[in-house]
Image (tube, rainbow, N blue to C red):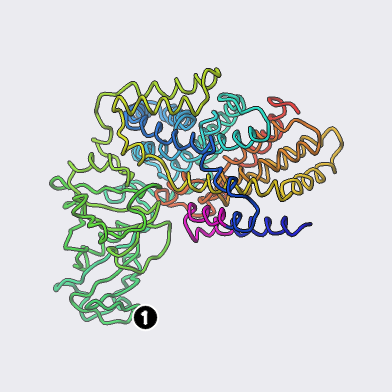
Amino acid sequence: MSLSIIGIFLLMILVLVMLMLEIIPIDVLGIGLLLILWFTGYVDSEQAVAGFSNKAVLTVAVMFVLSHALVKTGILESLAQYFIDLEKKVKWLGLGLFLVSVSIFSGFINNVAAVAIFIPVAMHMASKFRISPSKLLLPLSYAAIYGGTITLIGTSTNLLVSSVSENHGIRPLGMFEFLPMGFIFLVVGTVYCLVVLPRLLPSRAPVSTLVGKYHMSTYLTEFRIDKDSPLIGSNCRDEHVNERFEITVLTVIREGVQITSNIADLELREGDILLTRGAIENFLKFHQQEKVLALSDIKLGEKELQAGDNVLVEGLVGPESTLSGKSLSDLDFRKKYEAFVLAIGRRGMTIKQKIAHIRLRFADTLLMLMPADQVAGMRNDPDLIILQHHEINMRKKRIRWLAVIVIPLIMLSAATGWVDILAAALAGTFLLLVTRHITTREAYGAINWPVIVFIAAFIPFGTAMETSGAALLIGNSVTSLANLFPEWMVPHALLSSLYLMTALITSVVSNNAAAIVLTPIAIAAGNSLGIDSRPLIFAICFAASASFMTPIGYQTNLMVYGPGKYQFMDFVKAGAPLNLIFWIIASVVTPLFWPF
């Protein structure tokens, strides 16, 4: 094995570890990888920047804009309202059509956008049926993931694989060429989500009162000891604070100084600030019985919450949110949104900072108290995904049908070969901009730039794997393993192995990264056996979107992780059987649609 191949393997391991640990942002990681490849001579200057002019990367960017335009019309929210009405009459019919619709829309728009729209609907269904949101949110994410496999534009992975294949002289993947097997996945996945998943998923979030209604992940909040509090002169151990209220006092802040040691025996004084972790209903009980003030004297009792125009709202920090990396004090959050953040939840993690100083991250949940008439405006803000259902949930506005028609026209044009998909997408975007259905500011804001930069910067890695001989070596190794089977089974064993390898890798790293690395390997393996590489390529496409077993495998899984109060093992238990089922289906069915 040459030094150049060893170097590529070491670099691949380093990148995989960095992606799993999330040490640095993915776009920064991508640029760093590109520079290493460039400086070490694995790629030349033209190959290093080729990703930024790659047709698939540009198509993904334009599809972000078109997805935003479709979301902006309000038609998806109107459809969501239909399911809310339908499920009042027939529970399982409403849920089934709800999941199928999420899958279908994910085949045409960005999966994250689809999940963001339908999370409040799932929450409302859970409330109406008196079941835990954890029974519905993971099925919602799964429906979006396998729904993205039904068309070429359903996920950026399909576009990337098509581009890599085209660069190897293979015919581009068709717009609806995915549909036959994608439809099978959709049907099997929907049945699994309706029948099996509810039995595997826990009921961690019972729906009860207004403050317990969505019962999201454990929150962090602060209390100030008032002059009438019975805690003055006592301590948390003697008052059995943890046992009586099921909350954890993490830190005591006294005159600006944080006290973190021996907190249980610390004698409490008036004005002390207690940084606590727990569930919302337990905060209420603690506030009422111990006469402690929640933040700036905001009363959190049921009477106060239901009185006047104030409502309790839970919001999720979105993947492209400008709030990420900033604290509430940096943002002047109360002035900007006219909302008061009562608590912050973060994927089960314990945070030992004052709320105002916590730097927000993607998938953080914010519990906010705000005037009811401000909720509609916040729903239009791309930085926060509002989770709690309100009567004003669905925006009542005239649907602008041009944006609804554009995406089907693009797909029809590309599918019939009238125009190239990128040309059709650009034409559609231009039409929407000229007619002012969206503004240029909205168009630029709709693009997930970290994803685009990461994909463009990662493409040279695929080139380096080929030029170094690493792709051929892995392809030959996989082929050698397949050769252990009888001759007639070798192509099928190779396909099955590639699918399984891709599905496992995409559970811990980006599906785009997995596809970029493994597609050249699939092509090399096919060439080594002297068979058509097309079935292997489609196996990579479908497997790269099979991110069911971990919350970090796909963004939509991370979006529902906090709201559903899930634990890591919930994804393993719920996702592993679905991965196994899809693996068996792909191994058997793929050669039927794409013969060797």
Q: Residue at x 40, y 47 (%)?
A: 319
Q: Residue at x 72, y 55 (%)?
A: 5
Residue 515, percent from left and from top: 61, 42
User: Is 23 located above or below residue 488 in the figure?
Assistant: below
Q: Nearer the viewer, residue 18 or 552?
A: 18
Most common secondary structure along the magenta stretch: helix
Q: Is residue 114 left or right of residue 29?
A: left
Secondary structure of residue under mark 1:
loop
Q: Which residue, as the protein is rendered here, is positioned at the far front?
A: 45
Q: Which residue has dot 1 on it?
A: 261
Q: Is residue 367 left or right of residue 3?
A: left
Q: Residue at x 24, y 67 (%)?
A: 223
Residue 335, percent from left and from top: 18, 54
Residue 18 in the magenta stretch? The answer is yes
User: How many numbered circles are shown?
Assistant: 1
The quadrant the N terminus occupies is: bottom right
Highlighted range, magenta: 17-35
The quadrant the C terminus occupies is: top right
Residue 149, percent from left and from top: 55, 32
| Circle 1: residue type | Ser
